[in-house]
Amino acid sequence: MAKTPVTFTLNDAETALFVDPGANLNEVLRRGAGDLTTKHGCGQGTCGACTVLIDGVPHLSCLTLAETVERRRIDTAGGLAGGPNLHALQTAFMEGFAAQCGFCTAGMLMAAKGLLDANPNPTRDEVAEAISGNLCRCTGYEPIIDAILTAAARMQGRAV
Amino acid sequence: MLSVETFPTLQEAAGAVGPRAKFLGGGTLVMRAVSYGDQSFEKIVRAKTVDRAIGSHAAGLRVGAGATMADVLAARDLEFLHPVARAIGGPAIRNMATVGGNLFAPNPYGDFAAALLALDASVEMADGRTMPLADLLATRDHVTGLVAGVVFQRPESSAFRFRKISRVKPKGVPVISIAVHLKRGDPRVVFGNMAPVPARSVGAERALANGSDGAAIDAACAACLEGLAPEDDALATEWYRREVAPIHLRRLLEDGGQI
Amino acid sequence: MTIHKGRGFACINYPIGMNLGGDPSQALVHSTPDGKFMVALSSIDLGQGMKSVTRQIASETLGVPVEDVYVDTADSDTGPHCMGSFASRGTHRVGNAVIRAAAEARKQMMEAAAEELEVNASDLDTDGAGNIHVKGAPSRSISVAETAIAAQFKQGRTLSGRGIFLIPPSDADPETGEMTPVTCFAHAALVIDLEVDDETGEVEVKEINSAYEVGRALNPKLVEQQLIGGAWMGVSHALYETTEPNYPERDHRPEDFNTYLMPGPGQVVPHNLAVLERPAEDAPFGGKGPGEMCANPVLPAIANAVYNAVGVRCDRLPITPEKVLRGIRANGGARPQGMPG
C-alpha cells in the first residue's frame, strides 16, 4: 500500500516522513520520528498520555490521522526543555513530586502547557479542567495541580 | 488493508462514503476504531475543506458540521450551548470532536446531539437535503450521505437548560444527560442515555406544555419516563436510570440548570 | 433531597513482606574506578520510590554522598534475584539486602584506604562528603575517588559487596498451629467524612484524616506522596472501580477509561496526614514502607461512613450509587446513624 508523505514541524525541527495509510500521529511520532516522549496509553482517546500540541492547542495524538498534520506544528514533551534548562513546568513537577510511575507525565505536561499558553493565571478549577482528559494512577492529582499552579506563578514572576 | 481518500469538498467526499468507507471528522470515533483493528470498513474518507463556520442563518443559527466543541465554546452566539460543549471530553477532545460527529456518537456519548434535539435542530446534508435531527438520529446507522451543518433557532433567554450526570468530575461520560427547552406551549425535554439514541420524553413535555410551576414539575417528573427506553451499561443499570431520571429532571427544572 | 453526612473509621496492621517469610531479595554493590558506586538490583520501581530509597540506603551505609550512588534495576538478566515488588516488601527486604551489600563494599573501601594511608582500617571513618579520614585527625585523609583508583590500578582489589535478606520460611506447627507469619507490621488509622444523597445514592468523600506508622520515613516526601496518592486509589476502589459492574453477570463490562470509572481531578479529597515514626528493629534504618496499606483502610472506612450516613451496609465493592439507593429503598428510607458526641 502506498505511503503518504507528510511534512511538519516537530519541536522546531522540520520533519518529513512517509506514513502508512490510517497511521495515527502517535505511532508516527514514536516510530517514525523517534520521539518516545509521547506515550502510547489506551489508544482510545480516554487516557491523555499521548497529548501533544498541534498548532499550540492540545490534541490526542492517538486519535489524529497522521497525514492531517501536513504543514502544522507539533509540540511534544521532548521539546519542552531548552537544552539543559528544564521548562518551569518540568521543574515544578520534579520539585513537587508530581510524578510517581511517570507514565502520565508527558501528557500532563503538554496539557498544562496548552493551558498556560492560553491562560497564564489559571485558577485551581481551571487547572483541574485542563487535565481532566489526562488520567493519573499514582498521585491522586493534587500534586500535579499544585505543580501546574506553581509553574504558572513562577512563569509570571509571582511568589509561590 | 486500510486506505485514505481525500476529496477537495464535502460534497465529493459524500459520494465516496458507504458501508465500507467511513468519513473522518475529528477522529475521535474513526481513529479509535482504526487503532482497535475494526474490520468493518476499509477506507477513510476525508474532505480538504472543513466547514467550521458558526453564524446566523435564515432559520436562526447555523453550525458547520466540522465545528469542534472548542469552536462552539469560542462562539459568543452560542453561549447557551457552552455548558454542553464544556461537558464533553477534556480540552484535547474538545479541540477535535465535531458537532457533526456527535450526532453519530453512540451511548454513552452524544450530549451535544441531545441538546440539539431539544432545540428542534434540523440537519443539512452535503447533497442539499434537510431533515429534522430526530429523523437523522432514528436512521443514523444506515443514513446515506454526510452532514454539512445543523440549523436551529436561538432559545429565549434561560429557556434552555442542560444537565449532565457524570460520576467522574470535572469530566466524565454521563450516566444520563438532560436537555430542556421550555418553549411556551411546546416544550422539549430530551434525555441522553435513556434510549439507544437521544430521545424526547413525551410525558414530561405534555406536563410542561402549560407552564413549569410546581404542579407542572411534579407532573413532568412523574411522567418523564414515557417515551424512554433506558438500557443497562457499564455505568448504571436500567433500574437506576429509571429511578434517578425524574430526580435529576426535577433538579434541572427547579434550579435553572446549574451544572 | 437530603444530603446526609457520615463518618467512618478503619485501622490496619499491615504485615510487611510475604506471609510466613521465605521471600528473599539480593543486592550487589560495586565501585567504578572513579569512586562512584553502582547498586545492582532486579527489584522493580513502579513509581513507589524503590530506586530513591535504595540509593539513600546505600549512600548512608557506604558513607558516601548520595549523588555518587547509582541504582541499576528492573532487569532480571543483569541484576541479582528479587522476589518482586509486592506485599509492601521493597523497602524492608531489598533495603536490608542493600545494607548488607553496601556494608561489605564499605569494608573493602576502608581496607583499601587504610593501605594507602598506612593505618588500621578500624581507625578510619568516612565524612559522607566523599572522603575517608583517620578518626580524630581529619587532615590525614584520602578521597573515595583516590581510594577507588588505588584499589583498581595499584592494589588489584575490588570495592564490592554482596547482600541477601531472607526471613526464613516459617511452617505452621501441626499440633498447635503456631507460626511466625511476619516479623514486621506497619500500622494506620483513618477517618473518612463523606456525604450521601438519599435520592440518587451518590457518595461524595469530603475529607480524609489519617495517621500512619511506617517505622522511619526514609524519604518523607516519597512517603507522603505515596500515602496521598494511595488514598485516592482507595477511594477509587471503594466507590468506582470494577471490571464486573453487574457481577456475577458478565454483561456490560467497561471497555475503556471512560466506562471504567475513577475519580477525576475535580474530586481531590483534602487529606490531613500524620506520619508517626517508630523505627522497626529488623528494618533498614527502621523503615517499613507504606506500600499497599496506603489504600487499604480507605475502603472499610468509606463503607462504615456510608452506613453511618444512611444506615446502608454495603458488603460488595464498589459501593455504587445504585447499591446505596437500593439499600435506602430496602430500609424504607435513609436511616442516619448519628455522630457520636
Image (tube, helix red, strand yellow):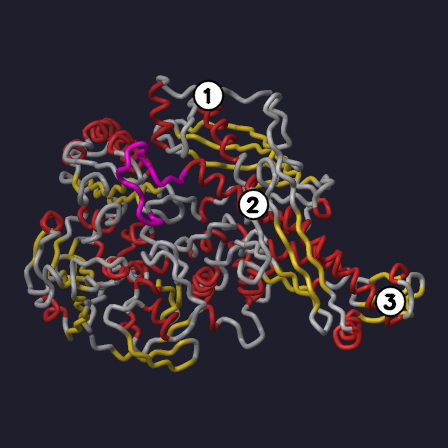
Mark 3 to mark 2: distance in Å?
47 Å
Q: Residue under mark 1: which chain is it in?
A: C
Q: Which of marks 3 and 2 is nearer the N terminus?
A: 3
Magenta-highlighted residues: C240-258
**Type of amino acid at the residue the image marks with label 2:** Ile
Q: Residues within 10 Å of mark 3 (few under 14, many from 20)?
A: many
Q: Is mark 1 on a helix, strand or loop?
A: loop
Q: Is mark 2 on a helix, strand or loop?
A: helix
Q: Name the residue under label 1.
A: C336
Q: Earlier in the sequence, mark 1 or mark 2?
A: 2
Task: Tell me what residue is drawn at x 23 percent, y 71 percent.
Answer: A21
Position of the N terminus of chain C, as image quadrant, is: top left
| Residue C65 x %, y % | 74, 64
Q: Do labels 3 and 2 share a chain?
A: yes
Mark 3 to mark 1: distance in Å?
73 Å
In the current view of this chain or complex, which residue is farthest to the top? Answer: C332
Q: Name the residue under label 3.
A: C114
Mark 1 to mark 2: distance in Å?
29 Å
| Residue C294 x %, y % | 56, 41
> Magenta stretch mostly in which secondary structure?
loop
**Type of amino acid at the residue the image marks with label 1:** Pro
Residue C317: image quadrant is top left
